[in-house]
Structure formats: structure tokens, C-alpha cells
Image (cartoon, grey):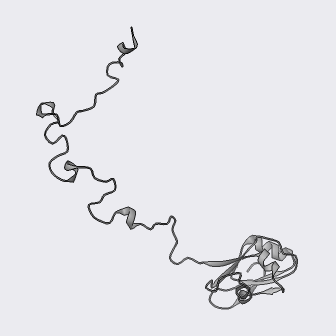
Amino acid sequence: MKLHDLKPAEGSKKQRKRVGRGEGSGRGKTAGRGTKGTRARGKVPLFFEGGQMPLVRRVPKLKGFKPPRRTEYGVVNIADLAALDGNDFGPEDIRKAGLVRKRDDLIKVLGRGEVDRAITVRAHAFSSTARTKIEGAGGTIVMVETGTGKEKEGAGA
């Protein structure tokens, strides 16, 4: 027995259907493509939708989802506040120092960095890390209510 005598086991390999090779083959004439139409005549791109604006062009380009009524904060870290002079910081002071953009209505204080003195910070929101670091240094946090201009003082606020 030689290498060219080897054949696959019977039934293990199917021969492909040769379409369009005459009526006697059973796959002649239209070759399994039906009659007329684009698919009968040529290739159609994978996501082609018949001239309608394709789904891939209808959906937004960037990934993710932003809720239309989300609450956006301008963020400032404790390290940035510690670098400033003074011990009392409100939203106006933070904006004047250039730590947040003017268009950021709400300000949130985050906990990156360390504070070495007792400071009072007035902002709309605080992360739990920022809260513990400020209070750990002997400072106080004051929550400024959104839109009303009222302030709530204390740790639980």
C-alpha cells in the first residue's frame, strides 16, 4: 500500500454540490437561487438593508449609554484643595481657583490625596473616602443642596 492509495473512510467526506451544471444534475437552471432578484444575480453585502439607512449607521458611534437626565458633577480631589491657601472652600472658591469648569453647576469632592490641616469644604457631594479624610484631619464638610442654595452641615448630611 502506498500513500496515494489512501482514501477517507466511506461516508466520512461529502462531495460538494456542483450547481449550474445542467438540468440533469438537479441543480441546473437557477442553481438553487430562485428566480430573479438581487440575490439571484450577484452578491449582496452582509449588512445591506435594501437602500434603507443601515443599522450600523443608525446607532450612535460611541459605545456606552448616557441617560439624558443624568447628574453630572465637576470633580475636585482633596490634594487640590490642600494645595490652596485658606481653610474654607465653597463652590465659588473652587471655581475661582480653576479646579472645576465654570459650566459645572454641581461639585463633588473625591478622596485622592491627603489633607494636613482642618478645612471646611462646602460642595454638592462627597465621596466616602473624602468624607473620612477631611473629618479625620479635624475638618468639616457642608453639603450644599442642589438648586436651592441651602446648606446642610454635619457628617451624616
Identified at 33% across, 53% down, the residue is 46
Identified at 32% across, 66% down, the residue is 53
Identified at 33% across, 25% down, the residue is 13
Q: Quadrant of residue 47?
A: bottom left
Q: Position of residue 26 (x, y in %)?
A: 15, 33
Question: On the picture, is 122 further left or further right than 68?
Answer: right
Q: Quadrant of residue 28?
A: top left
Identified at 83% across, 76% down, the residue is 135
Q: Nearer the viewer, residue 127 or 99?
A: 99
Name the outermost residue toward the top: 1
Looking at the figure, which quarter contains the N terminus?
A: top left
Question: On the picture, is 117 further left or further right than 157?
Answer: right
Q: How many marks?
A: 0
Q: Nearer the viewer, residue 132 or 30?
A: 30
Name the outermost residue toward the bottom: 149
Residue 31 in the image: above or below residue 145: above
Q: Position of residue 67 (x, y in %)?
A: 51, 73
Q: Nearer the viewer, residue 12 or 44?
A: 44
Looking at the figure, which quarter contains the C terminus?
A: bottom right
Name the outermost residue toward the left: 23
Q: Position of residue 8 (x, y in %)?
A: 36, 19
Q: Position of residue 100 (x, y in %)?
A: 68, 81
